[in-house]
Amino acid sequence: MARSAIAPVWVQDLRAQLRSTVGPAFRVGEQRGKSKLDVRYSDGSRGTAVLPVQWLPAHARTIQELVERVAQQLALGRTLKQALESITGVTPQAPAPSAAADGRPLLAAWEAFGHYKVTRNRIKQQTWDTVYAQTGKRLEVIAPQVQDAKSLLTLAGEAWDPGMRRRQTVLQHLAAMCRWAVANELLPADRWTPPPSLKPFVGDRDTRRADGVPLTDDQILKLLEGLPQDEAGHRWRFAVQLMAAYGLRPVELMHLRVAPDGVVWCLYEKRSGGGKTQKRQLRALHPEWAEEWELLKRLDQGEQLPPFGGGVAEAARRYLMRHAVWQQLAATGVTCYGFRHGYALRAHQSYGLSVRVVAALMGHSPETHQRCYGTWTDQATIDSALEAAMRYRKLTQSKGSG
């Protein structure tokens, strides 16, 4: 049997396994979608047989086990035909094609893509299980409807608004999988070669979206009281307390360190068109929250935070949306960034800090701060500022008259 000069990775791995377990006399390949076995006997003659298993990455383990059992039967003096007849009664059979199973080759290609990425050290297993997990779940939903690369990207993106980062990431994963699968002959190039640009499928974010909604102190405390007292509730309560007290981006929960001098640092570096943010010292607003909740002590002792599968913000959204208090807040436009927005508003209204100081506390530039938070002029903010101005005027007038 002629061996392809450039065999797919899963085929190379399968053949390597068989060489180590049954030797080079047993070779496997593909014939009309099924697995084909080629056996070279000691006298130089050959025997071939089509195995009752489809030639797919998902069935690599089944193919290997079947060939190993055939080798055992041949060692007992049976012919290749007799060996297969004695085994096929217990060998798992490939399922018959059906309309509902049209997506199986695509799902098998996805699994093979993941195996390649992990075993070739392109990514860690944890990254596949978390970062790529949402892409895999979306693919499971749409696979039976997909006909080619373009329909794959179109359907996959419909789960998220145009321009969203998650939509872009999922489409990047799927396009990379298609390119790899075509290069390794798992999917036909004429249907599964992705377009050179993903921009038409990702779309553009609506720049007219409303500004982020800040959470007030009362809303934060009410939410904390409403979380359950089980293990998950305790872990998420800790996460919420950290985001609220220190004004963290959700992802920054994974980058907190306590220095020997007792200072809390955020080591997260955010890259953007304007450069890269630097690590920063965190300061709680309100300080009494950090003391009452013992945040420094709990961080220093390594208290467990919740698992963040699929990303911190998405994991927080999924958990909080199970609870009525958050559902009411979300209906007003609040997101997990509301804790950070609340910190910014608190820094200005309750503490009178300047834009430059608050921007440094939050780890972004004054320009970014002004752009993101400069439009918060609701009626309560106006009333509060005017009341402070009136008090200041009375104070200065009384001093001048004395």
Image: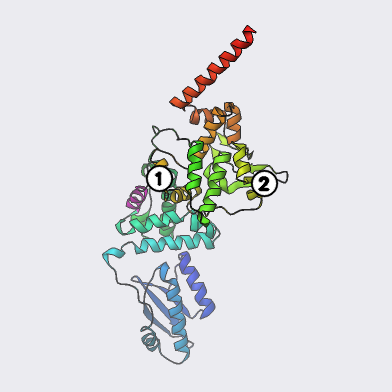
Image position of 354 with respect to 170: above or below: above
Q: Magenta span: helix, strand or loop, mainly?
A: helix
Q: Three-letter amino acid code at disc 1? A: Gln
Residue at 58 percent across and 54 percent down: it is 304
Q: Residues within 10 Å of mark 1 (few under 14, many from 20)?
A: few
Q: Earlier in the sequence, mark 1 or mark 2?
A: 2
Label 1 – label 2 distance at C-alpha: 33 Å
Question: Splitting the image into 4 quarters, where does residue 363 fall?
Answer: top right
Return the x and y of residue 269 as percentages of the image width and height.
59, 42
Q: In what quadrant of the picture does the N terminus appear?
A: bottom left
- Going by the numbered disc 2, the residue's amino acid type is Val
Q: Is residue 39 magenta?
A: no
| Residue 337 x %, y % | 49, 40
> Dot 2, crowdedness within 10 Å: few (<14), some or many (≥20)?
some
Q: Whole-percent x and y of residue 2? A: 43, 72
Please state the extent of the stretch shown in magenta in the rendering.
Answer: 149-158
Confirm or deny contact between disc 1 and disc 2 (CB under 8 A). Answer: no
